[in-house]
Image: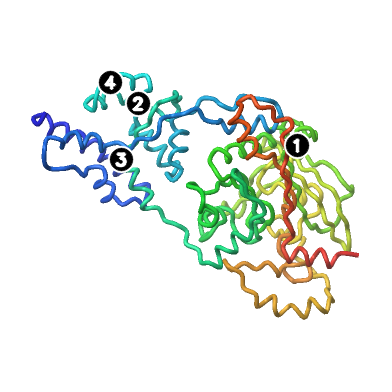
Amino acid sequence: MMMVYPTLLGRVLLQPSRSISSLCATTPYISTVRVLQSQYNTSTKGQNHYENDKRGKWFTLPPYTSTINGSVLGKALSTRIPAKSASETTALKWVLRCCPELPRNLVQKLFRLRQVRRESSVMESCNLGDQGQEHRLKRVAAKDSMDVGDRIFLPISVKALPAEKQDCHCSEEETNFIRGLELYKDDAIIVVNKPPGMPVQGGIGIKRSLDELSASCFSSDYSEPPRLVHRLDRDCSGILVMGRTQTSATVLHAIFREKTLAASNDDVGDKRRILQRKYWALVIGSPRRQKGLISAPLGKVVVDNGKSDRITVVENSQNLSSQHAVTQYRVIESSHGFTWLELSPLTGRKHQLRVHCAEVLGTPIVGDYKYAWQAHRNWKQLPWSNIEDNSNEKSRSEKILPFALDLDSGGISEKHPRLHLHCKQMVLPDVSKALQDVHLSSDYDFSQLASLKFDAPLPPYMKRSWDILRP
């Protein structure tokens, strides 16, 4: 054994070193020194040197057990049709479920570099001893199906990742503010009332986003952070739903996706609408009809010499790729040349409500300078003579909220109104109850499953606009 050790050690050190270095190049927060030390830290004494090196090469995941297929369960909830929620799981999905702290792109790269192994439950029954471990481990592809009892082996270097993860540090005031947005929470979901001006996701020029802050403020009793399942524009406010686990997030993704697919297939009947969203919007002007259904495809066009883009209604789908978009609307009340609309998107397209209001109804949303800049060129704020409100103007201006948010200014009585679009109500199936029932029976009938109803109050500046326009 001692004679073959240098050759085997060289093979172990040389081959993984190339893949590990390439991984570190795409993951800045990984310490290359720590990774190499973690993977190649071996003893220099005794004949157990070779065996320790071999055993320390892999990070072993728990044996695979039958799991709930979130996509199948979400579709069953959407259609109210019983369906078996337990199905095959791929190796990639099992790794992501066992290691939620690992970035998805890093796990995918491990599979592409053929750094992931599997020990089959069938082979495990053969007692080959420690020396036969390498022979029992086979390379596994990301899309390969798992059998009950199979174990996945990852490079030991992944154990160094959590220690290097950068946390989002919030002050006590910031933490209390984020937690104060909570409307509802159970084992499966978190529902918050997103404030206007706060981005949902990170990106270029964005320092703090709601998904990052939620991971810091709502994950105290969970090993994995909440996951976004839908989006709201930065300047939009209202109900935002997040999945507390990967399984619940997958179920919610499927519910939102099935809603869009059903509407795209011209099935807009109430019988399938287990997911309902109602937005309130203040628009300039008034639609010709008190209620109706908008069905207008949307597409993206590039403007400003390629510097930006915008969404527009596509008249001829042969010239520009488009997506089917459907919106129901209802007039709440009209006053002083403005109208409050209740908007129900049956599909989930980018800027769908804003474009449908501006280009189809001809009533752009107040404060939407992207799609209604011409309507705001000659904007004249509505006079507001409430003495009590004017006396509180100074106190509002002196109120400073965390993350530099301003929820008071921007009403229609001001020179530059803010976007008046708010996700006010939402109806969802009780995902937590569904997951509990599925654990008891994989053929559970969801036709009688109760729904959860949420209502988010308007932000202060929209509430003021509402008060101004009340007769």
Snapshot quadrant of residue 462 = bottom right
Q: Mark 3 or mark 2: which comes first in sequence?
A: 2
Please rate how many residues cluster around mark 3, counting C-alpha atoms within 10 Å: few if below 14, some from 14 to 19, many from 20: some
Query: Residue 264 falls in which quadrant of the image?
Result: top right
Name the element at disc 1: loop
Residue behind mark 2? 119
Task: Measure the alpha-carbon separation of dots 1 and 2.
Answer: 44 Å
Judge from the rendering whether residue 173 lies leftward or rightward of residue 82; answer left or right. Answer: left
**Which residue is nearer to you in this view: 169 or 449?**
449
Question: Which residue in the protein does label 3 denote?
Answer: 156
Q: Secondary structure at mark 2?
A: strand
Q: Earlier in the sequence, mark 1 or mark 4?
A: 4
Q: Residue furthest front?
A: 440
Which residue is located at x 75 percent, y 36 percent?
Answer: 273
The amino acid type found where label 1 is placed reads Arg
Q: Earlier in the sequence, mark 3 or mark 4?
A: 4
Kindly identify which residue carries mark 4: 127
- Camera-side residue: 187 or 387? 187
